[in-house]
């Protein structure tokens, strides 16, 4: 067995003494240092790995700049955001700056440099950047700066967040706010989850509308704007809708901060979250005070006489019906009086319409002064007034008649001189002379005619023998039947002009060439035509005779001039559609050549049926105009459903233009209403240049009246228009 190798001598054996101890100590220390260094490097590697994993996991772009060794590290998200290569050998600040929007680039560069130089430890900035696809994004950049003991920057770690969606939302919100503040519609949002439903947003229009600032409105329930009127009909409707979480549209009267009332059209809609829970209500409101005022004025016109402000025929009939019910229920006496002024036509003809109107207003005031508040006096038209007395006996009727006679006996100053007025009065009593409204009115009317026959300026109560006086009416009807057979009716035409003076149309107006009384206007016979049942036949003749004139207009080069024909309620409901179809077919009328004029009252008779019939008429190319607009009763909700082309402003409103603010307000409102509905307007009864100028200035489309042209036979109006066009 070979001898064993000699063992290596230990360091202690080679080196002995103090040197050996020193060397061993150094080696041990070196080992400790090496172990600590290894552990530090391992910990640093783990931290870098953890940092890299966090950087990869986050959607934000992260970067780390070693300012001492001038190195830069960027996360994958950072490189994707700015379109930079992730594996670049060297990262430079310049390539990142190149991706910043040119308009923001210099601001960011200077800000970054200033942050490093001014001792900051944290820096924030927002800027736009260019995405790889060329679109523009919005970024928010936050930088943390580490500094040494001397304050020099040694490291900068930052994160960049793409806030494009947030920015777009902010811009959309700002745009929406600007739009809401720019609109004239008041908008409010209330919190339906909080007690009392406080307001959380109002726009500028609502501030202007209510007179309250946003600070005064936010946090409050907007019900306080109704003041003490918390039981308006619209409020209950609104409450039901809010309780049920559905849309609502109501009209309310609110009060501004200064106490003035105004009307709003309010639309409220619920807002729900993603789970369908009700969170808010959005309300939009517009000021409809002007519209309400117009409707109220028109409604007042529908039930009151414009000239005297007294109740008109319709309102009087309503009150008479109510009084008859009370009379039967409580056993009260009731009396109807007809008061007709004597020789009123003479005043009108000699002194003019203005004097006649003043006389009627004076008589109205004096009649009201003779009665109790429970009595009613109305104007039926012309110079005819009707009085309703409830609870009066025969002696009281005579006492009232004496008061009326005494009141009218006082002189009236007209056109600078004094005039005296008398009246013929007829009356009928309930139940002695009848217990129905129509019967009492008819018999009071008959008694009034008897008073005229007895020399006027007296009062006569109805007697059964007076019925024989009705033979005059029957005689008139008989004459009308003969007039139809003898073809004594003829049409005159009144031209209608545009505001610039160009003839645009002509209205056919019926006249009766009476064998002994001469040419009679419709006021002398039209009611009897209706009463006799002859209106349908005569109206059909008027329609055809006017329609045949279109061919003559075409031959004269005036094909654009339309023909307008008045239609009565009787015609409307007796085969009018068939008659119109026949004239369109027989005379080959193009669209717009013919127009029918119907009054509001006619249109409102069986409104739904009328709407359908008028729509069928319109499909034939025949226009429709509302005649005497504002003098009858109509619902705007029905009018807007009718295929109307024109509103004709009644002459009673035109008369006061230039002198009567009320007439001017009504005319302006009708013109505005028509314009809002896309309709034209025609003003009737234009007799002065002041009226013409006012209407032209306020946008009335067409004018008609004696100032521009009187009703004349067709050949004359045709020659006049041709001369004008020539």
Image (cartoon, rainbow, N blue to C red):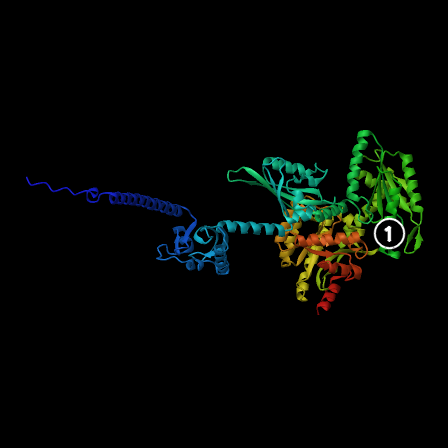
Residue 9 image point, x, y percent: 17, 43
- Please report the residue visible at 44 percent of the width from the left and 56 percent of the height from the top: 131
Residue under label 1, please give it: 358
Drawn side of residue 82 relative to residue 273, left or right: left
Front-lying residue, 367 or 94: 94
State the quadrant of the N terminus. Answer: top left
Q: Helix, strand, or loop for circle 1?
A: helix
Q: Is residue 574 visible?
A: no
- Please report the residue visible at 63 percent of the width from the left and 39 percent of the height from the top: 198
Q: Quadrant of residue 488?
A: bottom right
Drawn side of residue 669 relative to residue 43, left or right: right
Q: Is residue 421 above or below residue 702?
A: above
Residue occupying the far front of the picture: 17
Q: Is residue 364 visible?
A: yes
Residue 396 image point, x, y percent: 90, 35
Q: Residues within 10 Å of mark 1 (few under 14, many from 20)?
A: some
Residue 33 image point, x, y percent: 31, 45
State the quadrant of the C terminus. Answer: bottom right
Front-lying residue, 392 or 215: 215
Residue occupying the far left of the picture: 1
């Amino acid at each position: 067995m070979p001898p064993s190798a000699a063992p290596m001598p230990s360091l202690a054996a080679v080196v002995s003494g103090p040197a050996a101890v020193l060397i061993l100590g150094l080696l041990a220390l070196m080992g400790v240092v090496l172990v600590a260094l290894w552990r530090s490097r391992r910990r640093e590697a783990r931290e870098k790995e953890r940092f890299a994993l966090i950087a990869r996991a986050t959607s934000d772009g992260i970067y780390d700049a070693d300012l001492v060794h001038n190195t830069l590290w960027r996360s994958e998200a950072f490189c994707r955001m700015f379109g930079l290569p992730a594996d670049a050998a060297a990262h430079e600040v310049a390539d990142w700056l190149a991706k910043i929007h040119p308009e923001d680039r210099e601001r960011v560069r200077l800000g970054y440099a200033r942050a490093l130089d001014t001792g900051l430890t944290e820096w924030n900035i927002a800027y736009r950047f260019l995405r790889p696809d060329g679109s523009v994004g919005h970024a928010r950049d936050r930088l943390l700066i580490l500094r040494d003991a001397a304050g020099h920057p040694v490291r900068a770690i930052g994160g960049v967040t793409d806030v494009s969606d947030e920015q777009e939302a902010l811009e959309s919100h700002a745009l929406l706010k600007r739009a809401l503040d720019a609109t004239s519609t008041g908008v409010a949002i209330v919190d339906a989850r909080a007690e009392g439903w406080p307001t959380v947003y109002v726009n500028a229009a609502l501030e202007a509308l209510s007179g309250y600032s946003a600070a005064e409105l936010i946090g409050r329930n907007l019900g306080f704007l109704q003041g003490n009127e918390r039981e308006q009909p619209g409020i209950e409707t609104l409450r039901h809708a809010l309780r049920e979480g559905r849309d609502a549209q109501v009209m309310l009267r609110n009060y501004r901060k200064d106490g003035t009332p105004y009307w709003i059209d309010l639309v409220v809609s619920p807002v729900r979250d993603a789970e369908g829970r009700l969170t808010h209500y959005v309300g939009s409101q517009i000021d409809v005070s002007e519209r309400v005022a117009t409707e109220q004025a028109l409604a007042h016109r529908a039930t009151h006489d414009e000239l005297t402000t007294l109740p008109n025929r319709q309102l009087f009939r309503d009150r008479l019906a109510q009084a008859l019910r009370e009379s039967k229920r409580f056993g009260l006496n009731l009396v109807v009086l007809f008061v007709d002024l004597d020789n009123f036509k003479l005043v009108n003809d000699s002194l003019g319409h203005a004097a006649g109107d003043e006389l009627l207003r004076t008589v109205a005031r004096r009649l009201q002064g003779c009665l109790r508040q429970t009595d009613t006096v109305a104007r039926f038209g012309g110079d005819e007034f009707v009085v309703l007395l409830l609870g009066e006996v025969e002696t009281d009727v005579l006492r009232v008649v004496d008061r009326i006679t005494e009141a009218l006996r006082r002189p009236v100053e007209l056109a600078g001189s004094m005039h005296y007025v008398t009246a013929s009065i007829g009356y009928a009593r309930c139940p002695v002379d009848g217990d129905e409204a129509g019967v009492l009115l008819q018999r009071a009317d008959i008694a009034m005619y008897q008073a005229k026959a007895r020399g006027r300026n007296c009062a006569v109560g109805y007697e059964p023998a007076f019925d024989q006086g009705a033979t005059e009416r029957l005689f008139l009807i008989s004459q009308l039947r003969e007039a139809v057979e003898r073809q004594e009716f003829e049409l005159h035409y009144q031209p209608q002009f545009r505001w610039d003076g160009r003839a645009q149309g002509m209205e056919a107006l019926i006249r009766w060439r009476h064998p002994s009384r001469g040419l009679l206007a419709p006021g002398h016979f039209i009611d009897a035509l209706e009463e006799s049942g002859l209106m349908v036949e005569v109206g059909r003749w008027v329609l055809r005779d006017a329609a045949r004139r279109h061919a003559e207009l075409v031959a004269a080069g005036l094909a654009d001039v339309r023909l307008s024909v008045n239609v009565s309620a009787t015609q409307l409901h007796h085969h009018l559609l068939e008659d119109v179809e026949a004239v369109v077919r027989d005379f080959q009328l193009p669209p717009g050549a013919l127009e029918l004029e119907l009054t509001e009252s006619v249109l409102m008779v069986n409104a739904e049926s009328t709407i359908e019939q008028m729509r069928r008429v319109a499909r034939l190319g025949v226009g429709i105009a509302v005649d005497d607009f504002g003098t009858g009763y109509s619902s705007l909700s029905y009018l807007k459903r009718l295929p109307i082309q024109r509103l004709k402003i009644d002459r009673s409103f035109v008369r006061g233009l230039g002198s009567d603010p009320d007439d001017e307000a009504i005319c302006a409102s009708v013109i505005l209403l028509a314009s809002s509905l896309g309709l034209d307007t025609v003003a009737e009864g234009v007799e002065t240049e002041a009226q013409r100028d006012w209407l032209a200035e306020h946008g009335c489309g067409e004018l008609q009246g004696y100032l521009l042209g009187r009703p004349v036979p067709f050949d004359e109006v045709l020659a006049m228009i041709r001369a004008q066009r020539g």
